[in-house]
Structures are given as structure tokens and as C-alpha cells.
Image (cartoon, rainbow, N blue to C red):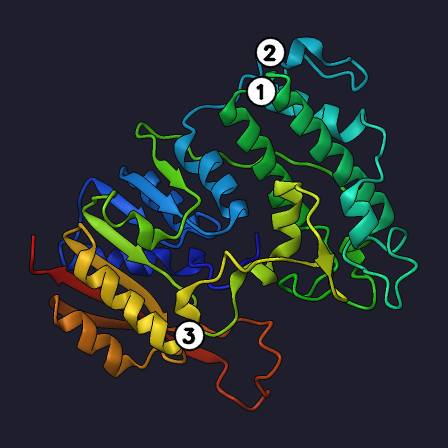
Amino acid sequence: MRYLGNKTKLLERIYDAMEQRGINGNTFFDVFSGTASVAKFFKQKGYKVFSSDLLYLSYCLQRAYLTNNKEPEFKKLIPILTDCCMASLLESPMDKVLAYLNKCLPDREGFIYKNYSVGGTKDLKQPRMYLSDENAAKIDAIRQVIEEWYKNENLTEDEYYVLLACLLENVSLFTNVAGVYAAFQKKWDPRAIKPFILKPIELCIGNKAGKAFNKNSSDLLSEIEADIFYLDPPYNKRQYAPNYHLLETIVKYDNPEVHGITGMRDYSKQKSRFCHKESALAELENFAKNAKCNYLLLSYNNEGIMPQKDIMSILKKHGETELVEFNYARYKSNSKVKSTDNKKVKEQLYIVKLLRL
């Protein structure tokens, strides 16, 4: 999934920096989990991972990838599915369920169709062009059926979140947006008019089950103790919730009141304090002072709203601090950057060996 600040391409360099300094352990807390890419990486390295995020979409991904440690069997569900999709006996349980969702459901013009497709919003001055009519109705059908299965106890919790993660990961491939969901494009991207299809996600199977939270991570400081805390907060004033409001609505499927040209949902309870300089520095101080860990790692960059000198001043009070920098390509959807400007930023990794433990 495309996601602001995703660290997938930097993870090996971050891990190398840790290894060079002898930073290791058994437990890891991914404090701002997002797509769970960092948490998945460290789960695969053998850590027991804790993770949290304010967005429910992130929690769904965390549950599918981090707390789940086996391929779903769908023992209660598969016997009640009709054989309309002619599934092969050689297919996995996951393949059979996704084949059913892809081929056997009649479309439903539900909340997503009515609010985020052209057909559903044709009476608006600017119809919302997030999804084609057909794909929006297909997504409504799939999301409603997953919820019906879960409420009827035909899915375990792990199976439920695996299916929601499949939906999330695939929806992002068919939406008519340039990067984030704060706006839709006024012309159809060719991928957005292709028929929607669910493909299986690649699960992260390990021998240590993690623990996922849908909370402000600062509220977990008294609850979680780990060898390593990894912080990757927002770098600027843009909140994540409005940038991913459509995905949040699809997985919550809570029929929220939406408003404006883009059909934005309320996100007043999902705002990060790291999106404002003063509160960001106060929050960083809170983590540095109260985190129950041996090492605190902070990913940031040289254009973030917290100045480097202020970050260093805070962190040095609480432990031995080192700054490692990597050149990194600027996020492509930053359209304000002129072609003549520097296309790279310095990704920063602050490494703190805390004094109190």
C-alpha cells in the first residue's frame, strides 16, 4: 500500500545501523505503525512486536500481519459457501474464499457507492471520482459480506482481520488518486477503471505473536516495555487521518457523516500531536522520559517541523544520542517541489541509548 513516510526501502539501512552499534533484543515497539511494514520486518527478524496507531486501517493491518501467525483455515465459513466459483480442490482456503468474494457476490450500492462513486454522487456540483461505479458497488458487497460472516460467527477474529487487510491492500490499487486520499483526480486513472479484484496478501508467519493497539501510543507508555522503541511520527503539519479517510471508512464501515468535495469523515479524535512543532517536541520529551526501553530510535528528516538542534537537545538529556543520516528520494506527491529543487532529503535516524535502564 502506498503510504506517506513508508520505511520499506530504508529498513535494511536502519537495521544495518543498529547491527553496527550492537543494538538488538527480543522485543520491539513500533510506535506509529502505519502499514505495519517496520513491525513486519522486525517480526521476521525474530522479535516479539508491539504496535499501535490512531488509524483503524493500520490496526487491521497490524492484526493481520503481526498478531496472526498462521494461514487462515476458514473452517466454519467454507462449508457454507456456494460452489458458484468452481474452486479447485488444490486451492488454499484463502484462495477459495477470495474466489467466492470475487465471483459470486451481486454488487450492492451501499455507503461507498453512494458517497465515493460518480453514480452515487451525481447530484453534487462535483461528483466524487474516487472509484468507478462498478468497483464501488463491488467493494460495498465484499465489505458487507465480510461483516455478516463475522457477526454470524463464521469467521475467527484473525480471519476477519486478514480479509479486511486483503480488502485494504487491494482497494489502494483501484482508487483514482495521485497518492493520498485527500483529493481525487478529475480524470480517470487507467487502473481505477479496471474491474476490482481481491488478491491474497502475503502473511507474516512467525513463532512470536505480537500485540496490536488502536490507540495513541503515548497512552501506552506505562503499559508496554520493550528492548527497542521505534518512533516514526509525522514530519509536518498534515494529519494522516484525512489523507486516508476513504480507506478508514471502508474498513470501519460505520456510515459516518461526510462533508465537502472529498466526502471527508470527522477525524477530530485521530489528530497527532507530532503535527505541530511545540506539541511535537513535548511529545518527544514524553517518550524520551517515560519509554520503558533500552534503546529509543527516532526516524525523521531534515525538513521536519522539529528542528534538529531541538531534537538533539531533548534526546541528549535522556541518554547517549547519535544521529545517522541517509540520502532519500523525496515523496513524489509533493507537487510544490520545483523540478530544479533538490529531489532528495536527508532521512535521519536518531539513536538513543537510554540512561535509566
Query: Label 2: how many residues lie within 10 Å, few (<14), some (14-19) or many (20+)?
Result: few
Is 138 positioned to the left or the right of 293 in the image? Answer: right
Tag 1: Cα neighbours inside 10 Å, few (<14), some, or many (≥20)?
Answer: many
Checking the image for residue 155, the label placed there is 1
> Which residue is at 81% across, 60% downward?
128
Asked if the residues shown at circle 2 and circle 1 are in contact, with their CB atoms under 8 angstroms apart, the answer is yes
Image position, residue 96 (x, y; %): 67, 20
According to the picture, the residue beneath numbered tag 3 turns out to be 276
Earlier residue among tags 3 and 1: 1
> What whole-number distance in Å separates the C-alpha atoms at marks 2 and 1?
7 Å
At mark 3, the secondary structure is loop
- Determine the image quadrant of residue 151: top right
Q: Amino acid at mark 1?
A: Leu
Q: Contact (CB < 8 A) between labels 2 and 3?
A: no
Task: Give the mark, 2 or 1, whose residue is nearer the N terminus.
Answer: 2
- Outermost left residue: 356
Q: Which residue position holds label 2?
A: 76
Q: In the image, residue 302 lies at what x, y percent?
A: 36, 79
Give how far across and how far down residue 140 sits, in percent. 76, 38
Q: Residue at x 54, y 46 (%)?
A: 57
Asked if 153 appears above or below 51 in the picture, the reply is above
For this orientation, the residue located farthest to the bottom is 340
